[in-house]
C-alpha cells in the first residue's frame, strides 16, 4: 500500500465504493467485502456467491490430500472464487510427514480446518442473517458447500466407520446462527431436489441428504415442545420461542406430510448403502409423521 492510500485510510472518511475497490477487494479481505455489500444493501447474487466461495476456500486452502476425489471437489469449489494461485496438492501416504511444520498448509484428512471454517461462517452469519437483507447470506449455497465438504470427509473413512446418522457439523453450524427451521428445511430439501428423483447414481449421497432432513424434522419437533423462552440459547443453539417454532411447524405440516411419503419412497429405492441405516432413517420419518398427525388433530 502506498503512502497516499495509507493517509486516505487513516485520515479520511472513504465512501463505500473506494473502500471496497481500493482496499478490501485489493487485499483479499473477502469477509469485509461482504459486509460492505450488506451495509449498502447491494444485491449482486453472483458477486456475493463469489465472495462466499472465496471465504470458504480461504479457510481450507492451500491444502494437501491423499484423495483424488477430494482434490477434484476442492478444485471445483475454488473455481469461480477469487483464489488464483492457492492450490490443492495430491500427495502419497508416505509424503504426509513432509511440510508438517508448515502451518499455512492444511491437511484435509485431519479436519483441523473445520473449526475455523465453522467459526467464520457463524460469525458472519450472525451479522448478515435475520436483519432484513438475507441475500448477503445465501444459506442454501453455503449449506451445500459445507455438506459437500462433510461428505468428502466421510468418504475418507473405512466403510464400517461411516455413518449418516451422526448430526453433521454443517447442520450444527446453521442451527447456531439461528436460521429458522423452515428456512433450514427448505435449503436441505432444495439440495435434494437438485437431482431428479430417478437419479440413483449416488445412493450414499441420497442417504446423507435424507438423514439430514430427518434430523432437521426431529429437532424441529423437539424445539416445538421445549419450554424455551424467546431468543434463549440451549447447547449453543439460538432459536425463537417454542410457541413460534410450533406455529411454524403447524403451518408447514400438510406440506411436510406429503413430502414424507416421497422421502420414504426414495429410501426404499436405494441400493448400496447399509440396510440398517436406511431403515433407521425410514423409521425416523415414520415417527415424525405420527407426531405431526397428532399435532394437527390436537
Image (cartoon, rainbow, N blue to C red):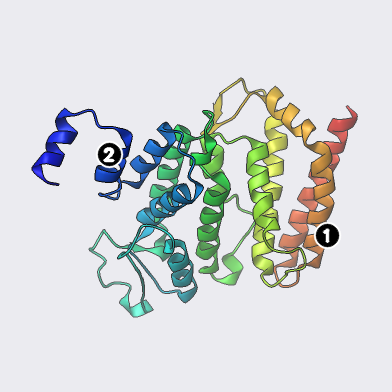
Give the structural element (helix, strand or loop) at label 1: helix
Left or right, 142 with respect to 108, comes to right
Q: In this view, does 241 lie to the left or right of 279?
A: left
Percent position (x, y) of residue 97? 29, 72
Residue 62: assigned label: none
Q: Is residue 112 visible?
A: no
Instruction: Choose mark 1 or mark 2, whichever is in front.
Output: 2
Name which residue lies at 74% across and 55% down: 281
* Residue at x-position 81% and y-position 63%: 268
Quadrant housing the C terminus: top right
Q: Within 10 angstroms of label 2, few (less than 14), some, or many (20 or more) residues?
A: few
**Between disc 1 and disc 2, whose residue precedes?**
2
173 and 7: which one is in front? Answer: 7
Task: Identify the residue at the far right of this view.
Answer: 297
Q: Is residue 118 left or right of residue 278?
A: left
Q: Gap in Å between the C-alphas at discs 1 and 2?
A: 54 Å
* Residue under numbered circle 2: 18
Q: Position of residue 296 (x, y in %)?
A: 86, 32
Where in the figure is residue 229, as x and y percent of width and height? 61, 20
Nearer to us in this view, 52 or 1: 1
Location of residue 148 in the rendering, given as x and y in whole percent from the top left corner: 54, 60
How packed mark 1 is, by other alpha carbons closer than 10 Å (few <14, some 14-19, many 20 or more), is few
Residue 265, disc: 1
Q: Is residue 237 above or below residue 106?
A: above
Identify the residue at image location x=56%, y=39%: 175
Q: Quadrant of residue 106?
A: bottom left
Amino acid at each position: 500500500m502506498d503512502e497516499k492510500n495509507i493517509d486516505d485510510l487513516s485520515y479520511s472518511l472513504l465512501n463505500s465504493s473506494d473502500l471496497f475497490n481500493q482496499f478490501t477487494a485489493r487485499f483479499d479481505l473477502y469477509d469485509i467485502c461482504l459486509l460492505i455489500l450488506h451495509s449498502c444493501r447491494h444485491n449482486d447474487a453472483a458477486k456475493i456467491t463469489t465472495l462466499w466461495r472465496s471465504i470458504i476456500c480461504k479457510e481450507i486452502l492451500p491444502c494437501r490430500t491423499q484423495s483424488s476425489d477430494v482434490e477434484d471437489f476442492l478444485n471445483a469449489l475454488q473455481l469461480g472464487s477469487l483464489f488464483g494461485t492457492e492450490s490443492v496438492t495430491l500427495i502419497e501416504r508416505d509424503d504426509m510427514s513432509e511440510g508438517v511444520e508448515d502451518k499455512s498448509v492444511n491437511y484435509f484428512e485431519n479436519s483441523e480446518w473445520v473449526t475455523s471454517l465453522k467459526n467464520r461462517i457463524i460469525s458472519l452469519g450472525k451479522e448478515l442473517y435475520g436483519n432484513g437483507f438475507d441475500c448477503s447470506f445465501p444459506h442454501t449455497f453455503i449449506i451445500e458447500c459445507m455438506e459437500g465438504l462433510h461428505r468428502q470427509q466421510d468418504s475418507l473413512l473405512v466403510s464400517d466407520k461411516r455413518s449418516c446418522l451422526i448430526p453433521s457439523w454443517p447442520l450444527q453450524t446453521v442451527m447456531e446462527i439461528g436460521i429458522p427451521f423452515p428456512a433450514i428445511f427448505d435449503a436441505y430439501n432444495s439440495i435434494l431436489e437438485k437431482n431428479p428423483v430417478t437419479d440413483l447414481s449416488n445412493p450414499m449421497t441420497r442417504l446423507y441428504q435424507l438423514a439430514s432432513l430427518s434430523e432437521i424434522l426431529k429437532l424441529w419437533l423437539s424445539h416445538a415442545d421445549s419450554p424455551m423462552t424467546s431468543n434463549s440459547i440451549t447447547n449453543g443453539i439460538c432459536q425463537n420461542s417454542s410457541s413460534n417454532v410450533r406455529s411454524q411447524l403447524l403451518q408447514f405440516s400438510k406440506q411436510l406430510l406429503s413430502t414424507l411419503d416421497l422421502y420414504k419412497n426414495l429410501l426404499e429405492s436405494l441400493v448400496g448403502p447399509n440396510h440398517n441405516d436406511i431403515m433407521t432413517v425410514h423409521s425416523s420419518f415414520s415417527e415424525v409423521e405420527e407426531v405431526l398427525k397428532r399435532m394437527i388433530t390436537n
